[in-house]
Image (cartoon, coloured by chain):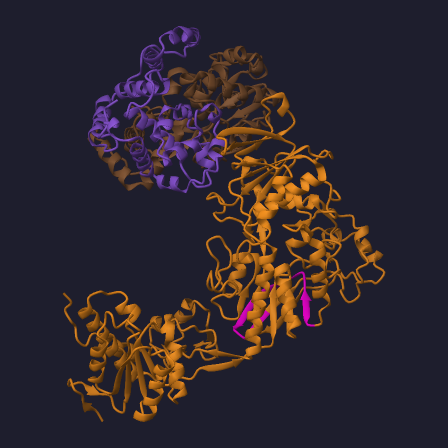
Amino acid sequence: MAKALTQTELSQVFLDRIYGLPEGEKVKLCLQCGTCSGSCPTSAYMDYTPREIIASLRAGMLDRVLKSNTMWMCTSCYSCTVRCPAGIRFTDVMYELKRLAIAYHLHSRFARAPALSRAFMSVVGRYGRSAEAELMVRLNLATNPLELLRLAPMGVKLLARGRMPILPERIEGRESLRRMLAWVEANDDAHAAQEVV
Amino acid sequence: MSQYAYYPGCSITVNNRAYDTSTRAVCQSLGIDLVELKDWNCCGATAYMAVRELAAFVLSARNLALTEQQGQQEMLTVCNACYMNLNKTNRYMAEEPKLREQIGAALAAGGASYSGSVKVRHLLDVLVNEVGCEAIQARATRKLEGLKVACYYGCQLSRPYPTFDDAEQPSTMDRLLEAVGATAVPYPMKAKCCGGMVMSTSEEVALKLVKGLLQCALDSGADIIATACPLCQVNLEGYQGRVSARFGSKLNIPVVYFTQLVGLALGLTRQQVDLGRELVSADRALAAYV
Amino acid sequence: MAEPGNNGKLAPAGARIGVYVCHCGTNISQTVDVAAVAAFAASQPGVVIAREYKYMCSDPGQELIKNDVAEFELNRVVVASCSPLMHEPTFRRACAEAGLNPFLFQMANIREHCSWVHTDKTAATQKAMRLVEAAIRRVVENEPLESRQVPVTAAALVVGGGIAGIEAALEMADAGKKVYLVEKEPSIGGHMAQFDKTFPTLDCAACILTPKMVAVGQHPNIELMTYSQVEAVSGYVGNFKVLVRQRARSVNSELCNGCGLCQEKCPSRVPSEFEAGLGVRKAIYTPFPQAVPRTPVIDRDNCRYFLTGKCQVCKKLCPREAVDFEQQDQLREIEVGAIVVATGYQVFDASRTKQYGYGELDNVLSSLEFERLCHAGGPTGGEILLKNGQKPESVAILHCIGSRDSNYNQHCSRVCCMYSLKFAHLVREKTGARVYELYIDMRAFGKGYEEFYQRLLHEDVIFIRGKAAEVSNVAETEAERGKLIVKCEDTLLGVVRRLPVDMVILSVGLEPQSDAREVARIFSIGCNSAGFFTEKHPKLAPVSTPTDGIFIAGACQGPKDIPDSVAQGGAAAAQALSLIDRGQVVLEPNVSVIDEERCAGCKICISLCPYQAISFDEARRVSRVEEALCKGCGTCAAACPSGAAKQRGFDDRQIMAEIEGALAEVVALT
């Protein structure tokens, strides 16, 4: 379905979704001053800076945005949000881009960040809480199994200090949580049109 | 005695028990009544919001609903990310009618509801603004004289909601630790990012950030780094070997939770504040205070 | 006695009404059947003559009215045409010239309220008839009113002795008028006195300002009150009474000859406001050597004598025995006809935006501080030096600090791009240092400004388009050690950059003075959301205010450079002079009047009046309207529980007549 729209059209879809976020319309006020990029701790490692992402969307060049590693480098530090002179909640924009990229499957299959998020969603959805060990296993199996070997020593150290439980903690209200999340899946129009992750 | 619904968060109970243990010990010592929120669930951290927006809010809101249901008005968190997520959920529900409606419907599907009445507080806020530095100073029987601490706040404690501390130059932890006799060294990178979950996805980049933080702490003359977030603690502590190897510099400094230091100052034992689980041992730095 | 009219209604006794329905070219006639409306009007009781005409506001149109008034002995006139805002004065004048009281005239707006907003001709014509009948019934109830004239006091007050205030004062004084110039600092000169060079000519600010300051000090028509503030203003246009507090200088100006001996030995050291905190002054001081007047003041909050009772060195040293510790503040009431408020601006406090290290890191300066550094009379004798006394080898100038920022001030401060360019030039000239200029847009809007920008391009200034995100002292490489690191995105390149520099200049924005809202209240003028004083019209009336007789000039109205401040000073002076030279002020008679018999003394009207025009007569226990202040808004008349307050020309009787006329025939519109 994503292939049916042109790049320009899809750029507009993404922009409209961003305008729909709380205070998302403020993106229209972006003066391209670059404060976000200058504040971002990882912008120097991004293919396109945060500011360039907005410029690219406005120019209909979605391709750049999605092929880039930009969203996946975002640590949610909120420095951009706090300093933006236009009052743009840029971190929320980054989240929306992450969600859209995942929903439209528009990223590398081996990209770690989407895989981590999917794994997280799966674990929390089932247990109600995060389970570090299972999370790391799932993430690395999906992206780079050899990584597990590399992480093993730290895992052992943590285990030795009683900081790495193997078994996940489960909440009692799992069923109730499941129903809540099911309601969202059934009724959330934000993801109605896309394939389920 | 002030009472709070205590929300530990996944990171505390899973691999950072020291924060939970020391928090409970310090609160007990200061007369803060913590009632752990029954059957709390994950707040969503930063990873969930990257896949789902509404579901992430619902996940977070369930905890707020539980707090209300269990008759509490204030929730106390210790992890920065939990604090930020729960606060964000509260605010967005108050500001966005449609979101409020949807979250309400989702909660109802699971037999819960939330009216928006819960206040979410960070432990640091409660200690400094409710109990007060003077009161804590008066109770500090074992002052941490001579201990040079770099107070590391991380990001989400004061961003994007600088409710109890400044977004650029927070100072509550500095004041608290100074009140118990330690020297909070001027630490310019105190509120800069540790990389968060990017350490798991793009380690190279996160290591660079951690290197900067460690280097700055050492340059500032710190003996030890105090943190307020379990993910920050793991990132700063757990990768020091890798940072040193990668960047060819010896960057080793113990990283503990501020509650462990406050606990020691209040006269608690090493065991009571759960020292000893660090990957980079704090024994030498804290020898004079245990 | 009443006579039955055509449609059975009673004709008002003695009313002889002329009705004129205007085509307004085709503006009205295109949509409204003007002939039908005129015919309708003719059929109304009391209407003696009803005409239609192409352009009622034209000379022949007005002649029609005048001739008919004479020929038909009309005692009421209705014109159905455009908005009263357009031509009510025109037709009133025509009536007056014909010998009819101008308030026995009523206008029906069948253009803006009818033909311009409807397309259905039938409905529009019927509506026009309703409006005309309303006007006819109303005008019968109108009473003759007289405009009052009050004389104008031939003196003016200028508040604020910066360049705008100085210009206004000199213009009015040169025109022969008495001018009071009140300035809260010990000397006039304002911020301009702090500047070194001015853009784009690089004129020395002091060289062009001090002659004007001296002229003010010496002008026979200007009474200069410095170290003084306006405490209260009462009265109305042409007749203001102003209470001025002249603060005690603790020095007798009559005796003092400005020798300066007193300041030499004063033991106190206080951060100098004039030096933007970079230098010190004494407790007894003149703010700068070229101060006008030269008489020093004693800052009693920091004076040893006033704090501890000891010292008195200045008094002992003064050869003229001019130091007077017993001096008290003086309260003076002055009477003026016009007031020009020119209270200027303050700069944005950069410590509010913590990411630039202002106040924490060495060598991060605000623009005003840097100005003092460049100034020959400043703390470094005009040398651009770092805290350690050395010359910088690299300087970064950061635009838009505290401006164009929803976190602080939304507005653009207009002058910062230009003064930033000026700084770049001065740094290059005085130190040869590398200069980075970090901007979002380059606003070089004035005469010679773009050319000045080009000059800087020639001078090898490095322009980077990108707002600086932060300034830090944490080095990542050896080259960065000991430097200030400016982090930004070079947006033209799309690259994040770290610039290691020795000095950072923050181009802070202009804000209203911190007490602007208080000052606005005193003068009954308004402020916009940023706090700048509100002009009467942003395009067409930038120096007058909705409060007649009070004018504004300079940066208090909005950020602006020196030429614009001077221009506004002159403009305000011209308007004030016009008022004073007219000698009289005509007051609209549609004011409120309170029937003392009915007034219960509840004071509800007083608290509601937006113009503070009602006062309470304690002796008689009734409220009284000060007619000259009353703007005829009608609030008191509406609120008065006993019906004691009424508005002339807007009586209940008159309004009800108008309503009855409008609803006389309720027509179904399909």
Q: Nearer the viewer, residue C17 or B194?
A: C17
Residue B27: where, in percent of width, then height?
A: 44, 26
Q: Is residue C446 above or below residue A62?
A: below
Q: Is residue C187 above or below residue B257?
A: below
Q: Is residue C587 left or right of residue B64?
A: right
Q: Please state, as top left, top right, bottom left or bottom right, where the C terminus of chain C lies in the image.
A: bottom left
Q: Which residue is found at the position 47% from the left and 56% from the top?
A: C528
Q: Nearer the viewer, residue C558 or B4?
A: C558
**Can residue B78 be seen in this snapshot?**
no
Magenta portion: prevailing SS class: strand
**Can residue C373 be seen in this snapshot?**
yes
Residue C563: where, in percent of width, then height?
A: 60, 57
Residue B45: image quadrant is: top left
- C238 inside magenta stretch: yes
Q: Which residue is found at the position 72% from the left and 55% from the top?
A: C207
Q: Is residue C465 above or below residue B152?
A: below
Q: Is residue B96 left or right of residue C439?
A: left
Which lettered chain is shown in brown? Answer: B
Which lettered chain is shown in purple? Answer: A
Residue range highlighted in magenta: C221-242
Q: Which residue is found at the position 52% from the left and 29% from the top?
A: B136
Which lettered chain is shown in orange? Answer: C
Residue C245: where, in percent of width, then height?
A: 63, 65
Q: Nearer the viewer, residue B240 or B31?
A: B240
Residue C352: image quadrant is: top right
